[in-house]
Image (cartoon, rainbow, N blue to C red):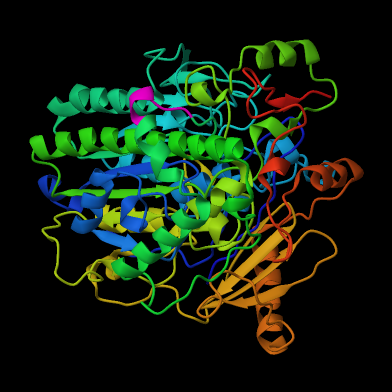
Amino acid sequence: MVHLLKVSIISVLTVFFISGIIVAPALKGFAAYAQAPPNNRPNFLLIMGDDFGYSDIGAFGSEISTPNLDALAKDGKVLTDYHTAPTCSPARVAFLTGVDWHVGGIGTMYELIAENQVGQPGYETYINDKVVTVAELLRDAGYNTLQSGKWHLSGHGHQPGTTPYERGFSNALTLLEDGSNHFNDQPYVPGWSVTFTANATDTPRPENGTHDGKMYTDQLLGFFKKTESEKKPFFAYLAFQVAHSPFQAPAELIGKYDKIYSVGWDKIREQRFEKQKELGFWPSNMTDPGRLPPNESWDSLTNDQKAYAARVLAVHSAMIEYMDQNIGRVIQYLKDTGQYDNTFIMFTSDNGSSEPFEIALFQYASGFDPTHAKQFVAGINNSLSNLGNPNSDFNYGAWGTYVAVSPLSGFKTSLYEGGVRPPAIIKAPQSTSSPSNNSTSNLVKSFTYVTDITPTILEFANVSHPSTYQGHDVHPMMGKSLKPLLNGTVQVVHPADEAIGGEMFNNTSVRMGDWKATSYGVPTQWKLFNLATDLGENTDLADQHPDILQRMIAAYNKYAQDVGVIIPRGEKFEQTAKNNFPPVTQNNTQTINLNDMFAPGYPLNASKPNIAVIN
């Protein structure tokens, strides 16, 4: 089945995180782990980035310095057509279970759950017991299971039975929520919760004052050293909060990017696209597919706006480079201990790009304490010279994704390719590949999906997926193993007649080969695109191919029935959606204007501009 994504922005007191979907038969025929010689069992290292745009690393055309990920790409495979969910939590539950997020408990986010969804199966808003995680299965199969970083699968607060430790990780240092300040344990939104756990116990944030790119890496390396003597294979999940809001990075890395981005977002987008063509992603004669909605021209900005936007992009890039440096520390440890060759390593992102609105535009729910919010805002310094420091609090909204998702359309929370198509790299175990003279030799261009990852890991580990777990029936996996694709024995795992659907907040999408159908909100208005000729999703072909569209709509309806989609209803939900959902249906005559992305009273040259509108 192909893939479908749907998403929406978040609710009033909320921010951002939504996700994707997938459907496919359960994996069968795996032998128990004990049948494999213990010394031959591969290790697994899953590195999860947060809100990466498609072109935000060097191996995908970026000017950002990511030498460690680039080297990993040369040793492995670059998945140019990997898809995920449009926001955090849905993607993460699908990634770790191989099952659609509606089944796994996150049919919607708790911040935007509609009245008619409350208490319904699959809408718990946290990971439920209808799915089993890959960590639980590998732990039971004799693996050391290690987790460090963001989790975001425990719903609102600390729900019993939902932490990494309770879902299969024997050693875990976890941020339960969607994010925090990168340097400390403070929220980045007034009133937001920040909860760290060490295994099953709430704990203060380790290394307060250290950027979390290093802090999470330190924790994982500590787990490796702690468990070295046990001589077990490991399954490690390193889940960074980079490059999620707020954009913050060590000061020494920010300055190198200022000049780079002073050329403007149009030029950077063009350069990334040209680099991708050099790498073999696209035909050399392909023209820019056009981004919907487009940015206004860089040349139309004032000098102050250009300087501010360039600095925002510079901080974002510095944060990514710092993450790459820390990934390098982990890879070096594996090489120093002789484990690199026999380790399956994957890097990807939960969804594509950052929030489609700036933190400055948050509006808080009625009943929220305005005094606390004003105190929070008073402590923020988003002046130009302070951007990126611990007391700054910003992101780039929709205008920054123009660069990040090059050459795609859309942004996080949308089902446009830019929201659901992140960078992805996999190095299989026992890899001995070296850089090739053929620049396209490591590219996998066929469609792959977020629910394919757990089946892939289980096949490499020679571990089967159960029908019941700890007394509960569990849903069969819906993804397909990518092992034959990585081994080169097949060219595709999802044939063109397989439909993969997804839904979130009544935004829907379905993929069948190169065809993609999408529908946003109410009333339902399906559009049809052919990504082989229209990567930017600019030309609706519904009228030219009504037969194809009807077949895809029928496939979506079956998917929705199979996974239990409940269409959100209710005045509260509809009003929230109206006020907060991004303009995903804009046309090419409407542009994203930098002025529009800053809240009233947010002058670019102010020493302490406000970051929020307090209702």
Q: In this picture, is 57 found above or below 217?
A: below
Q: Quadrant of residue 44?
A: top left
> Does the rendering let one see residue 170?
no
Q: Residue furthest right?
A: 571
Q: Residue at x 49, y 29 (%)?
A: 163
Magenta-highlighted residues: 248-253
Please state the total of marks drawn on the protein image: 0
Tell me: residue 430, above or below residue 179: below
Q: Is residue 434 left or right of residue 183?
A: left
In the image, is residue 108 part of the stretch drawn in magenta?
no
What residue do we see at 39% from left, 44% from top? 260
- Residue sitting nearer the eye, 213 or 136: 213
Q: Is residue 115 visible?
A: yes
Image position, residue 214 (x, y; %): 33, 25
| Quarter of the figure that contains the C terminus | top right
The spot of residue 309 in percent (x, y) is: 55, 39
Where is residue 252 drawn, in percent x and y?
Answer: 33, 25
Tell me residue 148's x, y (percent): 37, 29
Quarter location, residue 579: top right
Q: In terms of depth relative to the viewer, which is nearer, 7 or 454?
A: 7
The residue positioned 51% from the left and 21% from the top of the image is 386
Give the side of residue 304 with respect to residue 579, left or right: left
Q: Is residue 226 left or right of residue 558?
A: left
